[in-house]
Image: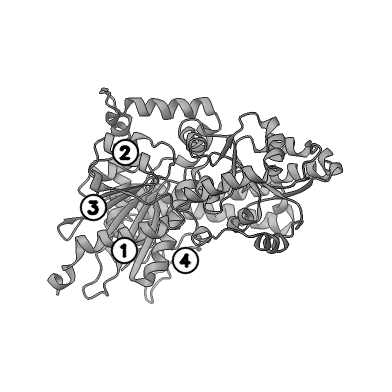
Amino acid sequence: HRHSLCRPFTMADEKLTGEEQPTPGSPKTEEQPTPGSSGSPQTEEQQPAKPQEESTAQESTSILGQAQETVEKLDVLGVGKTDVAQQTQKSMKDLSNYANRIGKVASFAFVPPKPVDGEMRKYKVLIVMSDTGGGHKASANSIAAALKSLYGDEIEVVIADILEDYTLWASNKMYNWWSSMPWLWGTIYNSTKRTHSLSGNVYLLDPARAFEPTVLPGFIRCTQEHRPDCIISVHPILQSAPRATSSHVKNGKNIPFMTVVTDLGEAHPWWFNKGLDQLVVPTEAMKEQAQTLGLKAEQVAVCGLPVREGFWDVEAATAERKRELKEKLGLDTELPIALLVGGGEGMGKLREVAQGFFKHIPKEGQPAMQVVIVCGSNKELQKSLSKEAESAPGAKAGMVYSVQGFVNNMDEWMQASTVIVTKAGPGTIAEACCCGLPILLYDFLAGQEEGNVTFVKENGLGEWLPEAKKVAQRAGEVVADPALLEQYNEACRKNARPRAALDIAENTKRLILERWTGDEEEEG
């Protein structure tokens, strides 16, 4: 029997006790009296004791069900379109998720049953991550897609958010709060670098080791639930805790453990654990960093940063191809495009930079630009910028503006563009390189993205423009310089690794075969 990652926590108890558990969100049914009985309810002494986790689940289901009915009534009345009702729906979803998480943490003692004897052999890969920023989740999805593309149903892939689904850490909300204050996040990031044992400094309190006890039980639970043949981590927090436990043992052998670093310029010491089977890094420079921190050369593979499937086979966009894409995307086919992005959440100085483009008046000899602003899931930003674009002074000088929300075809937007204006997110930089798209950086997340700025500058991929108000002016100058565009284009393609996810998938299969070949015959 295979358990779903998102299953209600009572399903494990159902298999263990043989009793049918209520499905969250479904109404409870009262027990009917049997013929010949008085029909009266059982006394307190007669009623069977319910497991604590079942009672918790039923109470949570009842409360959530009542709240959901209220929200549905608001929708019928037309109130569901208001901000109040939308916020209520979001709060109830968060409460539902947290109730399930409490149940999982409370039921760590219950271990799901092992696969039934005779079950068809299928390898399983467990990718562990924490959805703190879009990069980790995007990398996990990219690796999963590559495994599916190369091996189809031969390998089953499960992506697990350990902190959100198996512990009580509100990691996503904490990260968003911390990262909204660059000085605070920079302090946290850099202080944990200096106090980590791998930094060479010995401190009584290593933050990674102090954090382990809060994560380790969740990792054990997840590993026991899925019993994978290989574990891949795409998050620095999920390194020392997994290697500190013997829970990842299957058929008397350690489950192979691979880490894929999702930073470009420099990586936090938490990424580098000497007990790993394989560490995948994006650059040769980072391989040297790993060896400096104690890993052996044969443990480290340079594959690049995994990018989304749409970028795996991207070729240099010809003028004809760009025109086709512009028509498909509903854009002006003649004007050069400046693509503004701020990550999946529309973070950083995106608003300030966009406003600079709204005010931009091309200098003599410079072409007007078509500015595409991708706000991601930040709907409020999309709404306000769309309104500002309608009365932008630049429009009178021939500038054209298009404000988008979250897009699923970023590969097409990048191929259609002339230059990308972005914060220093590693995934965006790697994807821009695949498209040969010159990169203009306007912001970075303190600590973890500083090295990405250095990576872009040292490799000649583009420019660092810290003054948001001057970004539009410089973008206009770059777009008007064909020689400079070609120089950046060639440098980007030289540093591109579009097949990174596929190479990682092949390494994963190799690790699995090396560890488990022969087990089927032994079991037979």
Q: Position of residue 79 (x, y in %)?
A: 73, 52
**Secondary structure of the residue carrying numbered label 3:** loop
**Secondary structure of the residue carrying numbered label 1:** strand
Q: Please rate how many residues cluster around mark 1, counting C-alpha atoms within 10 Å: few if below 14, some from 14 to 19, many from 20.
A: some
Q: What residue would you read off at disc 3? A: 248
**Secondary structure of the residue carrying numbered label 2:** helix
Query: What is the C-alpha distance between the residues marked 3 and 1?
Result: 13 Å
Give the mark nearer the N terminus: 4 vs 2. Answer: 4
Q: What residue would you read off at disc 1? A: 124
Q: Position of residue 288 (x, y in %)?
A: 31, 38
Query: What is the C-alpha distance between the residues marked 4 and 2?
Result: 63 Å
Where is the N terminus found, in terms of image quarters? bottom left
Query: What is the C-alpha distance between the residues marked 4 and 3?
Result: 41 Å
| For residue 104, above or below residue 461 | below
Say what amino acid the circle numbered 4 marks. Thr
Say what amino acid the circle numbered 2 marks. Glu
Indicate which label's residue lies in the foreground, 1 or 4.
Answer: 1
Residue at 44%, 38% (x, y): give it.
265
Q: What residue would you read off at disc 4? A: 29
